[in-house]
Image (tube, helix red, strand yellow):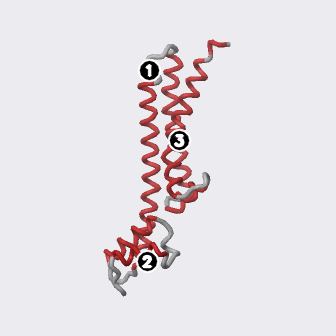
Amino acid sequence: MKKYSILGSFLLAMAGVNSAYATGPEWVAAYIIAASLNIEGFSVNEIAYATGGTCGVCFTILSTAIGGAAGFGTAAVMNNTVYSGCENQEACDKAKVGSYAGAALGTLGTVATVAMVGANAMSLVTIGATVGGGMAAGATILIAAPIVAAVAVGGATYWWFSRDGED
């Protein structure tokens, strides 16, 4: 087994050598880690493949978790600022519940999406491809979905219950 330097592994990954493995930024990190580990009995490509797959899983799970936390954080901020001290307190109270329900639905939607497409780097690419992007777009969608759902459901709930007296 050849011993590659960290720089050599980085250059191999950037040049697309063995392009079946070197397909994204997580693979560059994987090749660097693989070269530095130099585990006996495993090639650099095998170690890079395992490390790169782990990075993709981590990116997907972290994006989903961050999105859920951001959705509930957005709901809390909206409830403490937008929906407190309203003229129509009943509509504000229902909008507070709606914003948390939206965050929960958005988070469940991201979890269901990840469950359908898988928790790996290609799943982020698949999700990102829905808007014409790649892995970064997929991570952004997973993070943004609960936030958008919290704002949309909270706002729609407030609008619906504040217009009752207009008929």
Residue pictured at 46% horizontal, 32% vertical: 75
Image marks 3 and 2: residues in contact by CB distance under 8 Å: no
Image marks 3 and 1: residues in contact by CB distance under 8 Å: no
- The amino acid marked with disc number 3 is Gly
Q: Residues within 10 Å of mark 2 (few under 14, many from 20)?
A: some
Q: CA distance from mark 2 to mark 1?
A: 57 Å
Mark 3 or 2: the one toward you? 2
- The amino acid marked with disc number 1 is Ser
Report the disc number at residue 12.
2
Q: Find numbered disc 1 in the image and state the secondary structure of the residue it sits on.
A: loop
Residue identified by numbered label 3: 106
Residue pictured at 57% horizontal, 58% vertical: 117
Pointer 3 or 2: first along the chain: 2
Residue pictured at 47% horizontal, 23% vertical: 83
Mark 3 or 1: the one toward you? 1
Q: Position of residue 66 (x, y in %)?
A: 42, 46
- The amino acid marked with disc number 2 is Leu
Pointer 2 or 1: first along the chain: 2
Residue pictured at 39% horizontal, 73% vertical: 10
Q: CA distance from mark 3 to mark 1?
A: 23 Å
Residue identified by numbered label 1: 84
Residue at the extreme right: 167
Q: Quadrant of residue 37?
A: bottom left
